[in-house]
């Protein structure tokens, strides 16, 4: 009976100690929304059309439902082992032309979204064997020659 009690207590203690890890749980940075950079902001000028703004900034994250003349770009980066970076850009249009830009948050802070080496999934290099966006048809080794088939008793090629 004493051996059973010792074994149970030892197993519980081992389980509790094993659950506590020195290294901790792997975390990664979590970016959300539209990335807003200083280069993008430098390209924005009053008088630009909506298409020009969309070319520079991309599609807005939010369009005001009751006021179609306002676009919001929001970016938030939740750092795994640090704080958060929050950026917000509100663009106002009049007659489909940019008239006002309003910023909030850490708009001047540069954000580095490059993957770091360390624990976690490996980052693939740019030397992939195939291009996923390649839309050219795969012709195979024959160079695109049509297949020919003969049926028994058929004299046509």
Image (cartoon, helix red, strand yellow):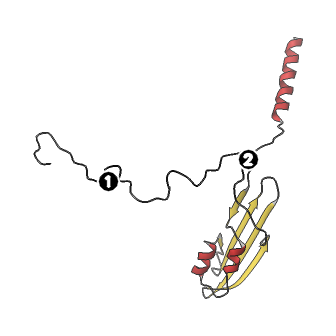
Which residue of the protein is positioned furthest toward the top in this rendering?
1
Q: Residue at position x 81%, y 42% from top? A: 24
Residue in front for this viewpoint, 73 or 128:
128
Task: Name the quadrant of the N terminus.
Answer: top right
Q: How many residues crowd around disc 2 within 10 Å: few (fewer than 14), some, or many (20 or more)? A: few
Kindly indicate the quadrant of the structure image that contains residue 114.
Answer: bottom right
Give the image location of residue 33, x and y in percent.
68, 65
Q: Residue 26 appears in which quarter of the rendering?
A: top right
x and y, in percent, of residue 10 in the image: 86, 22
* Nearer-N-terminus badge (2/1): 2
- The residue sitting at 59% across, 84% down in the picture is 49
**What label sits on residue 143 in the rendered view?**
1
Tell me what residue is drawn at x 64 percent, y 72 percent.
60
Residue 36 relative to residue 96: left or right: right
Disc 2 target residue: 118
Image coords of residue 41 (percent x, y): 70, 77
37 to 130, vertically: above or below: below
């Amino acid at each position: 009976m004493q051996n059973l009690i010792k074994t149970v207590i030892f197993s519980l203690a081992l389980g509790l100690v094993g659950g506590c890890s020195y290294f901790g749980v792997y975390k990664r940075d979590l970016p959300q929304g539209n990335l807003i950079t200083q280069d993008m902001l430098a390209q924005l000028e009053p008088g630009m059309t909506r298409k020009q703004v969309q070319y520079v900034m991309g599609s807005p994250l939010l369009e005001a439902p009751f006021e179609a003349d306002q676009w919001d770009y929001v970016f938030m980066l939740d750092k795994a082992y640090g704080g958060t970076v929050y950026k917000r850009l509100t663009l106002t249009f009049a007659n489909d032309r940019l008239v006002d830009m309003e910023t909030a948050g850490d708009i001047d802070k540069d954000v580095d979204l490059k993957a770091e080496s360390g624990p976690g999934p490996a980052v693939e290099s740019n030397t992939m064997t195939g291009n996923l966006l390649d839309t050219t048809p795969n012709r195979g080794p024959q160079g695109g020659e049509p297949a020919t088939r003969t049926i028994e008793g058929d004299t046509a090629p």
